[in-house]
Image (cartoon, grey):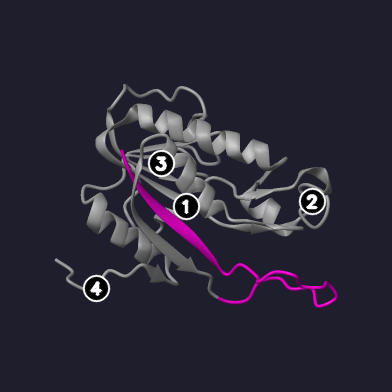
Amino acid sequence: MDKSLIKSVSESQDEILRWIMQLYAPDGFDLDPTYSRGLFYKNIPKPLWKFDIAPQIEDTLYGDCTKHLPFEDGSLSSIVFDPPFIFGGKNGPHGKQGQDIMGRRFGIFFNYDAMKNMYCDSLAEFKRILRRGGYIFFKCQDFTDTKTTMTHCLVYQWATELGFYAEDLFILIARGGRLYNPQLTQRHARKFHSYWWVFKK
């Protein structure tokens, strides 16, 4: 067994996911309802169930995690959740919807309320299908357009209001550079990190 120190911060997503598995999901992940192309799982075991609202590969099933997923109440032990984190509508962020590079890469919500509704409805559905003592591993990122939204704080609030307990928090530091336009006036610190919340039912 690997006895290396498990830390709250890393530049490697693989490392964080392995730490999460070691501490909270030693038998592997049960479900990823935002599987996309499965990039998380190049170097770690894939989840037992792979769903997405817009499946991109053959072995991924269609599923909307804001509604009724095809699982019995209290039937799963662990869920990996990586929803979009950008919002801004057709006039943002930093340009028209769908034309922003980050938006094309990660997806985009029309506005803040759309993000909140998706996150909260998904958390409620996860609460239904998780067994008592089961875990959600929720990846999120703060977002700045004309102002900063501390999304990781909101996710904590919404999850705990539903009765989840915040068991742990990991911080993923971005490697390499980010797109930067020196002609723009910078009013906020550029976000070079994201979060992995560990919520226990």
Q: Amino acid at mark 4?
A: Leu
Residue 5: give its label.
Answer: 4
Would you say residue 57 sits in the magenta stretch? no
Identify the residue at horizontal 83%, vertical 54% (top origin): 95
Residue 74 rendering spot, x and y as whole percentages? 28, 27
Residue 160: give its label.
Answer: 3
Reading the image, the residue beneath label 2 is: 92
How far apart are labels 3 and 1 at the CA level?
A: 16 Å
Q: Amino acid at mark 3?
A: Thr
Reading the image, the residue beneath label 1 is: 139
The majority secondary structure of the magenta stretch comes to: loop
- Residue 75 drawn above or below residue 80: above
Residue 43 seen in the figure:
no
Residue 109, quarter of the rendered image: top right
Which marked residue is nearer to the observer: mark 3 or mark 4? 3
Q: Residue furthest left?
A: 1
Dot 2: element: loop
Label whose residue precedes the other's in the sequence (3 or 4):
4
Label whose residue precedes the other's in the sequence (1 or 4):
4
Give 126 or 157, whichever is nearer the viewer: 157
Q: Disc 3, disc 1: CB below 8 Å? A: no
The crowd level at tag 1 (other Cα within 10 Å; few <14, some 14-19, many 20+) is many
Which marked residue is nearer to the observer: mark 2 or mark 3? 3
Label whose residue precedes the other's in the sequence (1 or 2):
2
Dot 1: element: strand
